[in-house]
Image: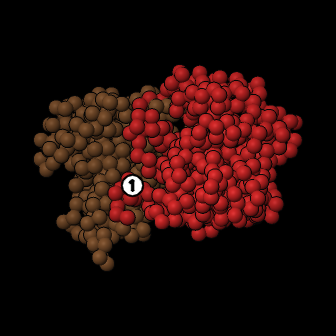
């Protein structure tokens, strides 16, 4: 246990900062705003490509996939540094962090060339098709069917909450391929191009305003998908879900730490809640480092990730509510700017306190609701019966 | 920041746990002798935190906490026998002052160490009946709470909170109602999960405080306030959820739960509640004292 930093990590951090100082797009370049999590204006594609070419996009990957074989602490330093400087490494985060990462973990060499590389180079964008109207918390209950017919899968069913689908070129889609197997054992994963006949996307706005459109319903009506688009083994899709999302989850706390840091910066107060907020931020970081050390040495319980997700998202929500109350009736004003504008991460900064509080709820709902994470902690850490 | 125990620290933790299982129920003087013999009093801050967390877990009846974290940082040495310190400027509610062989007094002329027998002390009856608390009468007392004392109470409280959670988990697994263990109900699970998260948060801040003291880091004052405030916030959740989940059993004298319930609230009340330390964090603003060694000031 020590406070000092690892020189190898600090060297890595310094290199990253040198790169950012040199290559970060200026506010003038950032002309067009990204309107969804898969909408990439030209300048954002150039930026992601620059990161890819310099090995800073997914630093944990080998050089040919936009990385530099970085160690886990270095990967964390990368996430922290981008967060500290309020920079998105990609304007299609799920395309990089989940879809390309899954293909690199589970895909064939051909699939890596055909799908992962273009995603990483920002030539195409991706969306993640997991949730369905009847399968949210009970994700394994998904019912979208895929039936093999010669060398194509015929897909029928519906996804929902598919962020950015209307701008995405490909959807990583979880489908049921064996309806007779136990529910976790009959799921497969298909890469479905969005221009496939029979795929219909219906984007819909979230509650903040009618022109904030990221959510989609996606309908599959006899969509014919080449069998070669199967990612991983048939009926082993649940492992892909665990593998791809697992990595993402290990670093997920960084985004909550960033939100807490935003609140500390944007709503100074002499109320006691402001001290609690700073304690939450400090504790979240320390728990994150602790978990990273556990992951490095193979001693961590995967369920500990639930502690960080639950704690981080709820701390952000509590802090946001306090800030909302602190600003009283002024919190009603919309639109309102409550944070300094950052062109590399413009989303939530140009929102009033009411909207910022509202925007804390996706944090406690998406990626497993707080209730699901409490169950996981109780069952897999404390050993309470199911 | 490297925030995990090294091998030696893990071994120490294990050794302390084993010792405390072995010595369970021994008279206080024998426990005290054992701790001294094992050199626990000499432990440096992070190792001391490990020892104190485990002592909190067994609601240790000895004057170890006061000797190691109230006397030592004030006197600048370890006590010969049991010791304590008076550093709140009033001499009121001093841990173990009634049974300390040596008492370090923080006065406007500096620290004065006095044999316990020569001081006017008055033990106070407390709801936590195993706790020793006394008022001390002395002149020229001034306030200056050592960070080590805040960290020590914080980490002991975390240890006692952990014990409550373990007792509760054992209870809800074994207690059946409606034909199933009550631990299978989500209402119960969620309360237990909240206890776990609160403990993890408080523990991590307690060890961070120990680490900043060990490394004489400029953030040590702020970290000590955070540790004490977090322990207080933690015990609120753990006390309420733990008491509730135990049902009527927890309200009995026979059940050991009561010992820990009382201890965790005492841990919050002594040396300032969570609320007082949150205020201290705000007024301190996170800025370090010039030499980084000045005792933390707590606005009473």
The residue that mark 1 highlights is A380
Query: Mark 1: which secondary structure?
Result: helix
In the rendered view, would you say B294 is above or below B59?
A: above
Is A293 on the left or on the right of B51, as rendered?
Answer: right
Q: Is B249 left, or right, of A154 in this rendering?
A: left
Say if residue B146 shows up in the picture: no
Q: Would you identify the image quadrant in which residue B254 lies?
A: bottom left
Q: Residues within 10 Å of mark 1 (few under 14, many from 20)?
A: some
B31 and A237: which one is in front? A237
At 28% across and 49% down in the image, what residue appears? B57
Please tell me the colour of chain B: brown
| Image quarter of residue A40 | top right
Residue B135: where, in percent of width, then height?
A: 30, 50
- Chain letter belonging to callout 1: A
Identify which residue, A47 or B157, lies in the foreground: A47
Q: Is residue A56 left or right of residue A344?
A: left
Q: Position of residue B96 (x, y in %)?
A: 25, 46
**Residue displayed at 52% across by 48% down:** A233
A362 is higher (above) or lower (below) than B47: below
């Amino acid at each position: 246990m020590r406070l000092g930093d690892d020189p190898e990590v600090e060297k890595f951090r310094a290199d990253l900062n040198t790169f950012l100082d040199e290559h970060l797009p200026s506010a003038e370049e950032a002309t067009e705003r990204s309107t969804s999590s898969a909408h990439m204006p030209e300048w954002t594609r150039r930026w992601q490509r620059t990161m890819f070419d310099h090995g800073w996009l997914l630093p944990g990957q080998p050089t040919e996939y936009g990385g530099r074989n970085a160690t886990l602490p270095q990967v964390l330093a990368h996430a922290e540094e981008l967060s500290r400087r309020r920079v998105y490494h990609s304007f299609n985060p799920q395309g990089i962090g989940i879809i390309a990462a899954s293909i690199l973990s589970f895909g064939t060499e051909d699939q890596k060339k055909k799908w992962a590389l273009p995603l990483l180079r920002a030539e195409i964008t991706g969306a993640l098709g997991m949730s369905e109207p009847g399968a949210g918390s009970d994700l394994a209950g998904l019912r979208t069917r895929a039936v093999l017919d010669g060398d194509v899968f015929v897909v029928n069913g519906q996804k929902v909450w598919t962020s950015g689908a209307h701008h995405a070129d490909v959807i990583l889609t979880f489908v049921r391929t064996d309806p007779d197997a136990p529910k976790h054992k009959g799921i497969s994963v298909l890469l479905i191009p969005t221009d496939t006949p029979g795929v219909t996307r219906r984007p819909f706005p979230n509650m903040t305003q009618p022109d904030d459109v990221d959510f989609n319903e996606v309908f599959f009506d006899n969509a014919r998908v080449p069998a070669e688009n199967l990612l991983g083994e048939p009926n082993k899709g649940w492992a892909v879900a665990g593998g791809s999302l697992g990595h993402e989850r290990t670093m997920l706390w960084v985004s909550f730490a960033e939100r807490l840091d935003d609140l500390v910066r944007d709503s100074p107060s002499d109320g006691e809640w402001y001290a609690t907020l700073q304690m939450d931020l400090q504790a979240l970081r320390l728990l994150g480092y602790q978990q990273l050390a556990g992951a490095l040495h193979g001693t961590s319980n995967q369920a500990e990730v639930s502690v960080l997700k639950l704690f981080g998202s709820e701390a952000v929500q509590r802090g946001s509510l306090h800030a909302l109350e602190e600003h009283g009736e002024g919190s009603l004003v919309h639109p309102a700017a409550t944070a300094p504008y950052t062109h590399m991460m413009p989303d939530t900064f140009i929102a009033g306190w009411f909207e910022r509080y509202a925007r804390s709820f996706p944090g406690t709902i998406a990626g497993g609701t707080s209730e699901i994470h409490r169950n996981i902690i109780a069952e897999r850490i404390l050993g309470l019966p199911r | 920041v490297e925030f995990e125990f090294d091998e030696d620290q893990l071994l120490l933790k294990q050794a302390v746990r084993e010792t405390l299982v072995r010595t369970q129920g021994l008279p206080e003087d024998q426990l005290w002798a054992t701790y001294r013999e094992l050199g626990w009093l000499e432990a440096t801050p992070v190792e001391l935190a490990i020892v104190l967390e485990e002592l909190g877990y067994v609601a240790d009846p000895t004057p170890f906490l006061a000797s190691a974290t109230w006397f030592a940082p004030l006197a600048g040495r370890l006590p010969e026998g049991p010791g304590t310190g008076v550093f709140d400027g009033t001499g009121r509610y001093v841990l173990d002052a009634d049974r300390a062989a040596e008492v370090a007094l923080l006065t406007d002329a500096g620290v004065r160490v006095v044999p316990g027998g020569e001081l006017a002390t008055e033990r106070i009856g407390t709801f936590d009946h195993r706790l020793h608390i006394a008022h001390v009468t002395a002149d020229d007392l001034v306030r200056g709470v050592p960070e080590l004392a805040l960290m020590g109470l914080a980490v002991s409280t975390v240890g006692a909170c952990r014990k409550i959670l373990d007792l509760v988990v054992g209870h809800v697994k074994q207690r059946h109602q409606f034909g199933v263990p009550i631990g299978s109900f989500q209402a119960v699970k969620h309360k237990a999960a909240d206890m776990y998260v609160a403990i993890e948060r408080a523990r991590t801040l307690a060890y961070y405080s120990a680490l900043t003291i060990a490394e004489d880091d400029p953030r040590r004052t702020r970290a000590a306030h955070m540790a004490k405030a977090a322990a207080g916030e933690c015990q609120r959740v753990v006390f309420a959820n733990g008491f509730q989940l135990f049902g009527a059993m927890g309200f009995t004298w026979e059940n050991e739960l009561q010992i820990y319930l009382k201890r965790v609230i005492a841990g919050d009340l002594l040396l300032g509640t969570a609320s007082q330390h949150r205020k201290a964090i705000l007024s301190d603003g996170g800025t370090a004292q010039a030499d980084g060694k000045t005792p933390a000031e707590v606005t009473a």
